[in-house]
Amino acid sequence: MTDKYARVMTPMTIGGVEIRNRIFLPAHTTNFARDFLPTQTHVAYLSARARAGVGLVFVEPLRVHPTSLGRAGGLSGSDPRALDGLRRIVDAVRSEGARIFVQITHAGRHGPNEVDRLPAWGPSAVPWVAGGEVPHAMTRAEMIEVRDAYVQTAEMAIAAGFEGMELHLGHGHLLHQFLSPAANIREDEYGGSLENRMRFPLEVVQSVLDVVGSRVAVGVRTSVDDLMPGAVGPEDHRFITRTVAALPGLAFVNASVAAYQWPSIGHHVADMAHPAHPFRDLTEALRAEIGDIPLLTANRYRTLAEAEATLARGQIDMIGMNRAHMADPDLIAKSLAGREADVRPCVAHNFCIGQIAAHQPISCMMNPGVGKKTHWSDPPAKTHKPSRVLVIGGGPAGMEAARIAALSGHDVTLWERGNRLGGKLPLCASGYGRGDIRAMNIWLAEAVDRAKVRVELNREASIDALQHADAELILLATGAVHDAGQLPGADLLSPQQALELPRENWVGQRVALWDEAGSWASLSVAETLAQAGAHVHILQASTAPLWAVSLYSRMTALERLAQLGVARHLAVSPLSVKDGVLMCRNSLVQEDTTLGPFDRFVHSTIGVAATALQDELERKGFPVRTIGDAVAPRTLFDAMHDAQAVARAIGRAA
């Protein structure tokens, strides 16, 4: 260990629990559960992070009551059958030297039991989103029932061996809903004034402290700002936190941000359009409110150096790093060994939280082995049948396949017809708010070099060249073609062409973006051109904007586009252009209308797989496999997953 991480590696104590360093894994839903019960996937996932050096692991929320079970992938805190699985998690994490706490919550109005068809409960009959399910307004008897359920879940957590627990007062969960005038319109002693709205959350926290506070560390997770009008702002959150922290026996405060409403909750999992740790100042302001109680925080900490820098400011005691550990569970160990360049970076693409929103097991675009039932070791196991492998295409799929194949023991060469590796990644990184993609490109290129892959740039994969390559297997990672297509009367630009133009070319331009992809590329073009001074209109046949962007990132993206004045036209299909005026058809009512006039037209398409080389190679009998967008244009995650799955299978039994 070097002195540059001295603060990170300083031990600390929370509620009598000694912790080996200042890095914790925040509680986060994984959707690994089956029938609301823990699985071996939980054990493997959490113990891997403990093994690599995390000081404290918070296990994902235990739902205290059947009305809060929500998705089937969540964990029950009221089912006694969960106890054995929770004990296995505790034992596995503790055996790796980390300490282990658990989060306890009731999701309230946004967490109905979708399996047993129980209604969501909330402080009032106010849906969490327009058109959302109307919750049942809790009676006083039901509030007592839920309060007691918190205590019972806390008792089960102690029986499982957890050394601490946090009660969730943030992120728009039930106790936060009671705090917020946007969710709580009660007219009894639990609604109205801030003091009244605090009453039930304080009763719950006090009840848990009274029963278990002398046996384990009990803390709270809070939000520092709801980031929405009519809810709870920073000043009231500071008062709430000060009041909770004054309860005798409270062991820590874990501060986050946001409420569970659109677009607020998108900021809770800040994507690459946000700066690093964007809400740190609001968290640090809590120090004056809570005295010496340990203050924890998370939100877009990417490196151990960033954690060290925040700790050095002297206000925050522990740093949560969740997505960074998804990207590379060995982040701490590699950094302490001076191998920071070897740490696989989190680029805050938010595929991970997108999986949760889609009710799927969590995974990671950079590390697609996360959450798999069949473990993908990293580095992969060595093959007993090494082969000569030629990878054609140096984009993300090609680089990742080459890396995994080489680490598996194969003799790997990579041909790239351009003069640099990365495919479309450098172009993606040039878009506004997309700079973190550059870290992905750099890491993959350097990882290919570390794996001893022979890289040949400016190399065309002609049939003649391939016949002399002596490869036992060819992996085609030639990507997809995204041309601009045609629209009568218009000169269409592709997203690539639009982003390659100097930014000053767009100042004052009226731009129609015909979006058939709903993707990050579409977003990048719209935001980049608008930031450059263009007046952007997005036209799409779909009624759902940016449908291919993960939900949490979509929320904040649409917020930014609105702030930039980008106009959106849904259910519209362009037909033709005359003198800059766009003739369109409304796909819902089949009526024609006009928009414009416009100065420039950009067409974002889903692309077409580049299969010409594959077809020719197969006709001539070459041993070939295709990966990534060359199979079908999909997401970056699919490209990385394809690459790993195919490369790991080389030379192994099916």
Image (cartoon, rainbow, N blue to C red):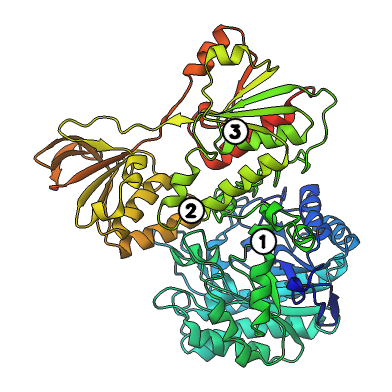
Q: Residue at x 39, y 50 (%)?
A: 524
Which numbered marker is on residue 398?
3
Label 1 to label 2, Cα distance in Å?
A: 18 Å
When the figure is inspected, residue 354 is found, relative to residue 129, above or below; the finding is above
Around disc 1, counting alpha carbons within 10 Å, would you say few (fewer than 14), some (14 to 19), or many (20 or more)? Answer: many
Choose between 389 and 290: the one closer to the eye: 389
Label 2 to label 3, Cα distance in Å?
A: 28 Å
Choose between 46 and 454: the one closer to the eye: 454
Percent of width and height locating residue 149: 72, 71
Which numbered marker is on residue 108?
none
Label pair 1/3, CB-CB below 8 angstroms: no
Percent of width and height locating residue 299: 59, 68
What's the amino acid at mark 3?
Gly
Q: Residue furthest top?
A: 620
Q: Residue at x 84, y 72 (%)?
A: 20
Is residue 149 among what the camera can see? Answer: yes
Percent of width and height locating residue 249: 77, 88
Which numbered marker is on residue 322?
1
Answer with left or right where residue 502 lies relative to residue 626. left
- Tell me which numbered mark, 1 or 3, is placed earlier along the sequence: 1
What's the amino acid at mark 1?
Asn
- Tell me which numbered mark, 1 or 2, is placed earlier along the sequence: 1
Choose between 135 and 364: the one closer to the eye: 364
- Of the residues tagged 2 and 3, which is closer to the observer? 3
Q: Which residue is mark 2?
A: 551
- Of the residues tagged 1 and 3, which is closer to the observer? 3
